[in-house]
Image (tube, rainbow, N blue to C red):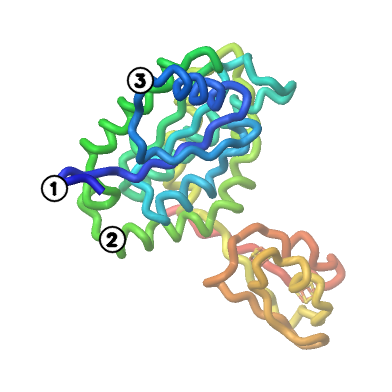
Amino acid sequence: MSSGSRFTPKIIGIICNWCCYGGADLCGVSRFQYPPHIRLIRVMCSARADLRHVFEAFLNGADGMFVGGCHLDDCHYITHGNYEALSMVRLAEGLLEHVGVNPKRLRLEWVSAGEGIRFANIMNEFSAEIETLGPLGKGEGIAGDELRARLEKVARLIPYIKLAKREQLALHLRDNPAGYDELYPREEVARLLREAPTYEIDPAQCQGCMICARRCPVEAIAGEKKTPHVIDQEVCIKCGTCLAVCPPRFGAVRQIVASPA
Ligand code: SF4
Ligand code: SF4
């Protein structure tokens, strides 16, 4: 905890094993200094960083989040997962902006294993930027409960968002990395969230076969065998699995898409 009224931000970093972590390691052995309040999590590829991690970090009190990977086209896997990390981060920025969180609280950088000093510089700069922005919520002028409700609402929709944006999230714009900046315009993000579908079970059609209840990943479907099942809308994450698995001869699950405002 810092002395006086100086704000010490909580910052989480997800960094890839092969490049950014190497840069962090070199930074350490070279004794370059960076703030101790940045907590780093090593993953095998920056593509492992997920929308869910971003929202969980902010819901759990982080003021900033960093994602670090290999420079584009230097990914150690043939999958070139850092393009997917780039797409994910651009989408996450749009979602954060939608709920009123400054997207600068999320930062993506490419750092090679030989760039220890660059790693230190980025960490120092990012930490200073978050300090300037202030604590999450306070910096935005949003009350804690309100911000939590907004973040939780979007976090619950992440399976649907990933499904709806799966093609963009898997894009590899190797000839035009700047194209990711245009991928998720503000109005498109708003439309995506506004039109999130609702899934309902028609009690007249449901045969109580229990297939959907067994396959629902969050146990949002209740019901006994041979009795109509019901979806708890507060628990449902809108993944669409129940619609996909309900036998066509029953056709009991309906997808209701909110009409555009
Ligand atoms: S859409 Fe269906 S399967 Fe998916 S979480 Fe909701 S109730 Fe469960
Ligand atoms: S899979 Fe379809 S018929 Fe079977 S319990 Fe679910 S909604 Fe009812």
The correct choice, above or below, for 18 with respect to 247 in the image is above
Query: Looking at the image, which is closer to me, 224 or 47?
Result: 47
- Amino acid bearing label 3: Asn
- Marks 1 and 3 sit apart, C-alpha to C-alpha, by 25 Å
Determine the quadrant in which ligand 2 lies.
Answer: bottom right
Secondary structure, mark 1, is loop
Q: Callout 3 environment at 10 Å: few (<14), some (14 to 19), or many (20+)?
A: some
Q: Residue furthest left?
A: 4
Marks 2/3 in contact by CB < 8 Å: the verdict is no
- Amino acid bearing label 2: Gly
Upstream in sequence: badge 2 or badge 1: 1
Front: mark 2 or 1: 1
Does residue 187 show up? no
Q: Position of residue 242 (x, y in %)?
A: 73, 65
Q: Position of residue 194 (x, y in %)?
A: 46, 54
Front: mark 2 or 3: 3
Find residue 5 and name its label. 1
Residue tagged by mark 3?
121
